[in-house]
Amino acid sequence: MNALIGRKLGMARLFNEEGTHVPVTVIEAGPCPIVQVTSGAAGTAVQLGFGAKKPKRASKALLGHVKRAGLEVVPRVLQSFPVAAAPEGAAAPEPKPGEAVSVAIFQTGDIVKVSGVTKGRGFQGVVHRHHFGGGPETHGNTRHRKPGSIAPGTDPSRIIKGKRMPGHMGARRFTELGLKVVKVDAERNLLFVRGAVPGPRNGLVTVRKQGGPSRHD
C-alpha cells in the first residue's frame, strides 16, 4: 500500500539534527481498515475506510458491505486506491479485507502528495481571489478594488470563458505535491509532513507516496 486517509490536526514545528527549525503539518493518518479488494484489467484496487459513522446514519447496503469485510463499525469515509506493483524479484503480501493499514507504510524522508478540500472563503473580489493590484489610490478615484474592463463591446461582444472575475473562492479539491515526511509516530498514528497542506483543522486529507524531488530541497 502507498496511501492512507487521515485528518489534519494542525501545524507545529520540529528541530532537525542541525538545530534548524522545520515547520510541519501534523496528520492523524489511519489506521485504515481494508473494506474491499477488487481486481481488473487496470490492476488491483483497495478500498480503505477511515473514522466511524453512527449505525443509524448508515444504510443497510453499507452495513452489509462492511460486514462482509468482518468490520463491526461503519467507516466515515470510504476511498479506493490502486495497489502499486511490487519491485521485480520481491514478493509483496496481498491485501485482504479486514486488515488494517497503518502509518508505518511511510518512512522519514519519503516524498508524498496530500489532497484535501481547501478552506471556503465565500464570495470574493478580484483583489483577494486573483491578486489583482487594484486601481489608483488617489483622490476622486472610485475603482480601488474593481476588475476594470472585462471585454470589448463590439467584438467578441461577450465575456471570454475563464476570465478572472469575482466569484466563489476556496472549498475545492486541491493536491499539494512534493512534501517530505519529517517524522513518523506509529504509536499515535501521526505523520509529520514538512510544509502546509490544504484544508482546515480536522479536515479530511489523503496522503499518497510520490516519486521525484521534494519542493523544499
Image (cartoon, rainbow, N blue to C red):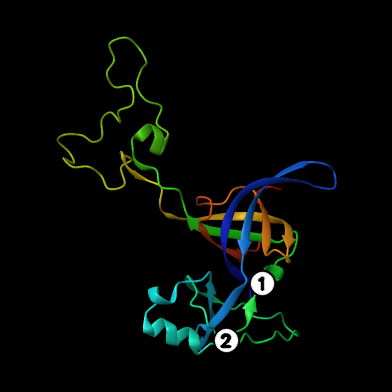
Give the x, y percent position of residue 56: 39, 76
Give the x, y percent position of residue 169: 37, 44
Q: Nearer the viewer, residue 29 or 217?
A: 29
- Specify the label residue 165 is tagged with: none
The picture quadrant where one finds residue 164 is top left
Which residue is pictured at 69% across the width and 71% down the height?
105
Query: Above or below — where is 61 with respect to 173?
Result: below
Residue bearing mark 1: 102
Relative to 102, is 124 on the left or the right? left
What amino acid type should be assigned to the residue bearing mark 1?
Ser
Q: Nearer the viewer, residue 217 or 153?
A: 217
Which secondary structure lies at badge 1? loop
Query: Above or below — where is 75 with respect to 29?
Result: below
Tell me the quarter of the image containing the N terminus: bottom right
- Residue lying at the far right in this picture: please name it: 18
Which residue is pictured at 53% across the width and 69% down the height?
51
Residue bearing mark 2: 97
The picture quadrant where one finds residue 7 is bottom right
Relative to 148, is 210 on the left or the right? right
Query: Above or below — where is 34 with respect to 197?
Result: below
